[in-house]
Amino acid sequence: MNQFLQMGANAVLSSPKGNVTVSYEISNSIDISLTAFLLTDSDKVQGDSGIIFYNQPKSPSGVATLIPTEQVGNTKVHKINFDMSKVPEGITKIAITLTEDNSTGFSNVKNLKAEISTDNTIIQLTPSSFTNENGIVVLELYLRNGQTKARSIWRGFDSGLEGLCRNYGVEVENDEQNKPSEPKTIQKQISVEPDKTLTVSENKYKQNTLPSISLEKVKGKISLDKGQKPVIIDKTPEITATVSWKTGTDYDIYALVYTKNGKQIDVAMFGAKGTPPLRSFGNGAVEHMGDIRGNNRSTKTEVIKLRLNNDILAVVPVVYSAQSNGTGSFYRYKVSMSIDNHNGTSVTIVAKNANNNDRIYSCVPGILHNTHDGVIISPLELYSTPNSERRPKLKMGSSNMVEVIMDKGPINDYK
């Protein structure tokens, strides 16, 4: 049975257990994340466990579990399972929210809608139009008189994630208060006392940052997708970042290096406006190995070698196809990046979320943070806006982790 819930209206759900899906038409100019907030009667979170997002996809009680994002045709689908019979003590409500992380805004998001599924019942929720909003409260799931209910909200915030966090009692730090420093050691546990304001950074939940939660040190062959939790690998004397693609176009790989003194160094075989070519940095700490063909003639690779020292905080490999090369469809040519520490561990990130747009010229599969505990690998899969030949720019975020900002660097030289 299908129902429609208008904005501002509420409905009793047939079961305390079900799922919420949010879908929209895919576009390379938008990057949407889903975050759920577990709230008390005062509409505030109790601590870190009260925020469900891509790097903390499941609440300890099992009341909410975020499912990896899927692509169905030309539609992106976010899904979160809920079981309101498992709400922890003091929690009465779950707010399902969206943020548009490219600052494009929800006015450019097409065919946005949400559905609540319980048993054999589907409740559809569709918003009205948006203007400058880049953060939205889609709906609320809550308990009332022993029943599980849903309310259609679709309330927007011009301040995006910051506005959402402040709304739910999460104090946001300003970037200006944080100067570049070494990445924080990965914490095994977080202790947050109940009913006190939780302090996080505005960018803590974006694709290109690392929140202070436990990460797993992995071994063997690992595959990461956008939205999955970062992993740590052992830091060996030499690590290679290899980008592979199907022969048929001419991609180039280069690396952006962020140093302890807050500088960005571009290691690339070709230059950009005001940035000359540089094959090697730091006496070989980051070195481009030039064009190398794989053994399989159907593929082509380029390799960057990393011999990380304490002056390097992060390395960001970038895959680039100049406009003069004729095509830049990262999806069609099956682009992937593999990080290998040559000690039995390799981590691969595949450009699964790309489309067939030939005017997307830059892809950032992931970011490597150099820490005392090892090398943290975070899957990003970020893409430039159509027709942009600009390089990404790196900056230190308020969580003391390096962030990637697309299309803000110099324009690549014509090739």
Image (cartoon, rainbow, N blue to C red):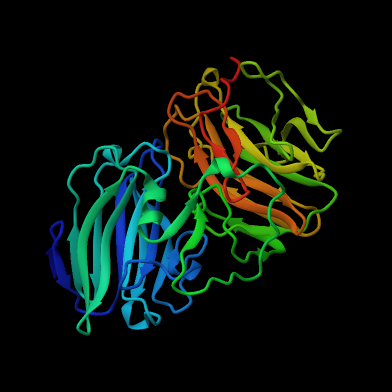
239 or 338: nearer the viewer? 239
Q: Residue at x 42, y 64 (%)?
A: 67
- The location of residue 274, given as percent across then percent down, is 65, 16
- The location of residue 403, given as percent across then percent down, is 58, 42
Q: Residue at x 52, y 34 (%)?
A: 406
Q: Is residue 375 left or right of residue 336?
A: right
Q: Quadrant of residue 20?
A: bottom left
Q: Is residue 71 left or right of residue 60?
A: left
Does residue 298 appear anywhere in the picture? no
- The location of residue 354, given as percent across then percent down, is 46, 41
Q: Is residue 369 left or right of residue 149?
A: right
- The location of residue 367, given as percent across then percent down, is 63, 45
Q: Quadrant of residue 89?
A: bottom left
Tell me the quadrant of the picture where the N terminus can be found. bottom left
Q: Is residue 413 above or below residue 281?
A: above
Q: Residue at x 82, y 53 (%)?
A: 236
328 or 21: nearer the viewer? 21
Q: Residue at x 47, y 30 (%)?
A: 360
Total number of numbered discs in the rendering: 0
Tell me the quadrant of the picture where the C terminus can be found. top right
317 or 168: nearer the viewer? 168
Does residue 90 appear anywhere in the picture? yes
